[in-house]
Amino acid sequence: MKQTILTFLTKVNSDRVSELTMHLEVMARDVENNTYIPFTDLKLLHFASLVLNDDPDYGAYFAFENNFDGPLDPYLEDLYAHASEGLHKIYSCCLDYSAASAADKAAMLSYLRARVVRPNAYHIGNVGRSVERTHREDVLRDSLEDFLDGLVRQGDSGSPASIRQKVQAFVRSQPNLAWAANVEPRQTTMEHFLPRLKIVIAAIIAVLLLPLLIPLAIIWLIMLRWTETHEPPPPDLDVNVHVRNLVAREDRTHIVQNHMASITTVKPGAFRRRTLWGVLWLVNFIARTADKGKLSGIPSIHFAHWSMIDKGRRLFFVSNFDGSWENYLDDFIDKASTGLTAVWTNTVGFPKTSWLVREGARDGSRFKANARDKQTYTNVWYSAYTQLTVQTIDNNSAIREDLFTSLDEAATRDWVRRF
Amino acid sequence: MVELQPEDMKDIQGFVMSGYAHLPCVSYLLLSVNDAPAARVWIGQILNEVTTSEGKEFISCLNVALTHHGLKRLGLNADTLDSFSRPFIEGMATPHRSRILGDSDENSPENWDWGFPKDSDDSEAVDILLLLFGKDELTLEEVINEHRARFDQGGLILRRALGAGRQPDIHEHFGFADGMGQPAIEGTIQTRDAAPRNVIRTGEILLGYINDYGKPADSPSVSPALDPLHALLDVPAMDGAGKGQPANSGVDRPAKRDFGRNGSYLVFRQMAQHVAKFCHFLDEATRTPDGQLDPKAGDRLAAKFVGRWQNGAPLVLSPDADDPALSQADDFGFRETDEHGFKCPIGSHIRRSNPRDSVGPDAGTALATANRHRILRRGRSYGVRPENRRIDDGVPRGLHFLCLNADIERQFEFVQQTWINNPVFSGLDGEVDPLVGNLSKGDEIFTVQADPLRRRVHNLERFVTVKGGAYFFLPSIRALRYLASL
C-alpha cells in the first residue's frame, strides 16, 4: 500500500483573504464535523491541513495539505464526491479559479491538478499502513488488552506461550476479528528494495565519477565557506506575540499529536537555492529507505514534507508529529541536527552554521526561536487517528502481524511484552 | 563567558542553593502592590534581610519573588518587561498552558483559590511572593508579624498566607519520602555529593550563565540609560552567536545591563492531596481474589505508582522490599537496570518526572536529553497529617510545589506536558502519571509491567487537585536593589 503526500497550493485573491479566513475559522471550530470538507468521510485520508499565509512580499497563499492512501485520482474523486460545495466556496477565493459552480467537476479538478505541489523530500512514519488498517489494528489491540485484563483478574496468566495460545484462541472465537489472520504486507518486495537498489547504484555512479566529483566538491565547499562567512548574522528574534497565536491551536488532541507548517525564505542567490535542492534530494533519497518508523532516529513523525515553492525561492515544510512542539524540536536538535541544519541553513534567519552541518541547530534557543518565527498558523488541521502515535501504530501492527506466525520462545516472550 | 564566582553567592537568593531543611516552619505570603512608590521603598528596606546563598545558617530566612504583573506595578520599564520569557509574561493560567499542564475540570484555573487573574489589570492579582522560614513556630510567627506590620506602610496588601507548618518527617501526605532526586548546579557546592549524571549546567537554573546548549540562558535586560547608577551587571560582550567569538560579527547590538543574572524563575503550584481517596483506591485495587484487604499489596501498588518505596529506596535498585540503606539513592538509571519496567513501571511518577537514561535511542543520548529538562524542587507539605488515613476529615492538606528553572517552557512545562501528562509517554498507550497527572477522563489506567504479562489497574481517580499557582521571578539582590531605585 503506497501513500501519497501532496499539497494543493493556490494564490488567494487579495480582495477575498478575509472571506477565506472566515471559512477556515468556521471549519476550525469543529474540524471533524465541519460542512466544507467532511474529513471523516474521506476514508483514504490520514492527515490534512489548510494553511493561509499572507506574506508582505509574496501575497496570500493557501495550502491544502493531503496525506492519503493510494494515488491521486481515486482520492480526488472521493474528495470531490464529498466536498465539492465546500471546495467551491474555498477556491472561489483563490486566483484563476474558474468553475462556475460546485457542479463543474472538470473545471474544479483540473484547477486542483494544475496546482499540485509534490514534495522535494518527504517522510512517512507508518509505511504501508492504510487508514483502515490503522483503525482496525487499534480495535484489535484494544480488545486483546481487555481480554488480557480478564486473564490477569482470574490470576491465570501462565507462560508466555500459554498466554499467546489463549489470545489466539480468543481471536479465532471472534468472527469480527477474523480479518486479523490475513496479513497484508506493508510494502511489496519491490517497494522495499528499489530505494536501496537506487542508493547502491548512485554510490557506484558516484565512485565512477569521482575524478569529476572531487573538483566539483572542492569548488562547492569553497563557495559554501565563503558564503557562510560573508552572510549577515541572523537577527535576534522576538517571537512572543507570534507564538501566542500559534500555541492557541496546539496540543488539542490530549497532546498526543501536533501539526507544524512553516514557510521560510531561501537565502538569496542561486548557490543556496541549488544547495538546498541537492540536500533535499539527498534527504529524500535516504528517507525512502526509512521504513521502520524513524527518520534520522526521530520516532514520532507521521507525515513530514519539504517543498521548494516560488521557483525555489521559498521552502514550505509541513509535519504531522507526535507529542509537544518542544519535544519535537528537541528531537531535531538531539538526533537530527546534521540533516536539519543542512536543509535550513540555506534559509534566512537560521543560526550561524559552518560547513553546512556544523553548529546551526545546536544553538537550541536561537534555533527554536527561528523555527517559531517561520512557523505559519495552521488554520485547520485534521487527523484520522488523534490518539495514536507512530510507535503505537507500529506496535499494533507487530502484534497483529505475529499473531499466528510461529515464534520461538524468546520471540513469544517479546510478543507478549508488546501489551 | 560568564562563570559563577564566589562573590555571586552574595547576589543569589538563598532559596536557590538551599531549601532550608533546618527551618521546618514556612509561610508563603501572597501580596498585591497597592502603592508602587511605597512598595519600592519597602523593597529597599527588606533588601538587607533577604537571605543569600553564602551558606550561613539562620534561625529564620526570607526570600522574595515577583510576578510579571508585580514587576509592572513596581514600574519596571516596558522593554525589560517584554524581555522576560513568554510563560512568565503570560502567567500560568492561559488556555494553552492549562492544556499542557493538565489544568482542566476541577484543576482548571477558574476553580483555583488563588493565581487566576480576572483580567490583565486585576488589582487583586498576586504581585509579590514573600517566602518566610523559621526554626520553630514561635520564630516564624514573630517574623510574620514583624513583616505584616510593614505592609501597610509599604503599599502592600496581603492577599493570602499559605502556611506550611512543621511535619513529623520528610514524607509527603501519601506517605512517601520527598525531595530526593535533585539536580546539582555546576559550579556550586551542590555538586559535592552529586553523581555526575545529576549535575546540570549553571544556566539551567540561573539566568545569564551557560546552559545545556552551551549558550547563555536567556535573561531579561535593561538599557544602560535606565540604569544610571549601574546597579546591574553588564550583559557580557560575548553571546550566543558562536562559542567564544563576538556575537556581533560586525552588527552592533546595543550594550545592555543584565536584570536576570543570578536570578531564576520560580514555579509555584498548590496541590491538594486527597489521602483517604488514595488509600481507598489502593485498598480496593488490591483486594485478594476472595475479597479480603491486602495492605502489603496496597503498599506495593503505591510504590509502583511512585517508583520508590515509602522510605525512598528506588524500585529499580530494591524491587521487592523497602531498603532503608537506599533511601537517598539517586545514582541510577532505568535502562541499565530495568528496561522493560518490570521493577519500576514505565509510567511511575519518578520515571515520568525524570526518565533519566530511558527515553531515547541509547542511554547516553537519552540522559543528555532528559537532563535538559531538570528542575530544582523546593516544595513543602502543608496541612496536618490525618489521624486515620482512610477517613476523609475534610482538613485541607497537600503540597506546595515550588521549583526553580531558567526556562519554564523547556523545563517545568516540558516535564508536565511531555512526561507527566503525556498519554503515550515512552510507548505507553492512554495513561498519565498516576499521582499528579490529569486523571479525568473516565476509565483511567495504570500499567504495571511484569514478566510475562503486564497488569492494568483501572479507574484511577484524581488523587491530587490544583488549588492555585503562578510563575514568579526570583531576582538577584542587585536586581532587587535596582527595583527599589526605580
Image: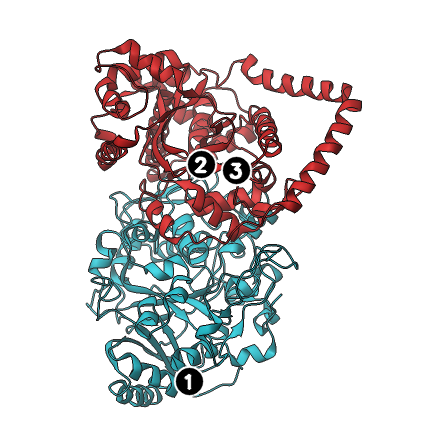
Chain colours: A red, B cyan
In contact (CB < 8 Å): disc 3 and disc 2 = no
Q: Where is residue A321 in the image (x, y as percent from the top left)?
A: 43, 36
The residue tagged 2 is A263
Which label was assigned to residue A44?
none
Q: What element carries label 1?
A: helix
Q: Distance between the residues labelled 3 and 2?
A: 22 Å
In contact (CB < 8 Å): disc 2 and disc 1 = no
Q: Quadrant of the N terminus of chain B?
A: bottom right
In the rendered view, tell whether residue A126 sits above or below residue B475.
Answer: above
Chain under callout 3: A
Chain under callout 1: B
Q: Can you see residue B342?
A: no
Q: Nearer the viewer, mark 1 or mark 3?
A: 1
The residue tagged 3 is A298
What is the tally of numbered marks visible in this picture? 3
Residue type at tag 2: Ile
